[in-house]
Amino acid sequence: MSMSAPEIATDQWKRIAAQKAAEDVVDGMVVGLGSGTTAAHLVEALGQRVRQGLRIIGVPTSEQTAAHARQLGIPISDLGEHPSIDLTIDGADEVETRTLDLIKGHGGALLREKIVAAASRAMSIVVDETKIVERLGSHFAVPVEVVPFGWQTTAARLRELKGEPQLRLDADGRPFVSDGGHSILDLSFRAPIRSAAELDLALNSVVGVVEHGLFLGFASKVFIGGPNGVKLLTRS
């Protein structure tokens, strides 16, 4: 499927931001490789540098990213072999300007992404400028990865948090299945999230929830691509 002109523009913004973020990777690093279209640009940039002699080990957050990295000649491993990661670079669905807190997971790899992020000394995020918001939940629902067994009961508990959960379907109209074998409920709210920290605690207490797409306190840098180049936000 061909992209529209706006999609081509935002894809180019993500590409230049990913290329800039890749410059922080140095010889000998263990690098967490994110998932999705934005992370694909990062993997391509790192693949080019590996061909030029950069020596790194990548820890991919999805099967798709792993396949892409192998194709480009990036050596890959896992957390069993490398439990401590120097730097993870990934995309995001939303970035809150004041806190650098994130919504992630619309690509479906949020569980592995958060496990890798938690094992990382630093995390850089690559986005285009349309992903920057004043408050999380302004444009995107919060993905919630759940155990398939009894997901309807889990959804009912999520409704008690004043949100509306929607079972994610794949391209064939079947329930989406994550790399971990779970379902995803996209939890939307009528207004931006008042307190992401409170929602984080509430989601963590719901039986049946495996993980969710609120990434609070993980990002140390955000590379933002736009028509005027790349802007950098850092955690104060």
Image (cartoon, helix red, strand yellow):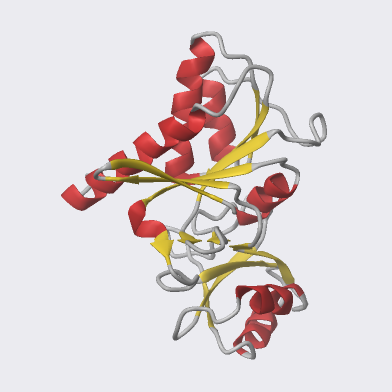
> If the image is split into quadrants, where does the C terminus sit?
bottom right
Quick one: which residue is furthest to the left in this view? 5
Whether residue 151 is visible, yes or no, is no
Number of numbered discs: 0
Q: Position of residue 165 (x, y in %)?
A: 54, 79
Place of residue 24 in the rendered image (x, y in percent of width and height, measured from the top left): 55, 29
In front here: 20 or 112?
Answer: 20
Q: Is residue 40 visible?
A: yes
Q: Please indicate whether residue 40 sits to the left or right of residue 7 in the image.
A: right
Residue 26 vertical placement versus 13 (above, below): above
In the rendered structure, the answer to whether residue 7 lies left or right of residue 22 reads left
User: Where 156 falls versus 205 (above or below)?
Assistant: below
Residue visible at 43% across and 43% down in the picture: 38
Q: Position of residue 3 (x, y in %)?
A: 23, 47
For residue 66, side relative to residue 204 (left or right)? left
Of 148 and 196, nearer the camera is 196
Please tell me whether residue 209 is drawn above or below residue 31 in the rendered image: below
Work out whether 210 lies above or below 39. below
Q: Quadrant of residue 144?
A: bottom right
Say which of 217 and 63 sits in front.
217
Kindly indicate the quadrant of the structure image that contains residue 171. bottom left
Name the residue: 49% across, 17% down.
49
Whole-percent x and y of residue 154?
68, 80
In the picture, residue 124 is in which quadrant? Answer: top right
**As drawn, is 202 to the left or to the right of 21?**
right
Residue at the image position 60 percent from the left and 63 percent from the top: 213
Name, please, the residue furthest toward the top. Answer: 53
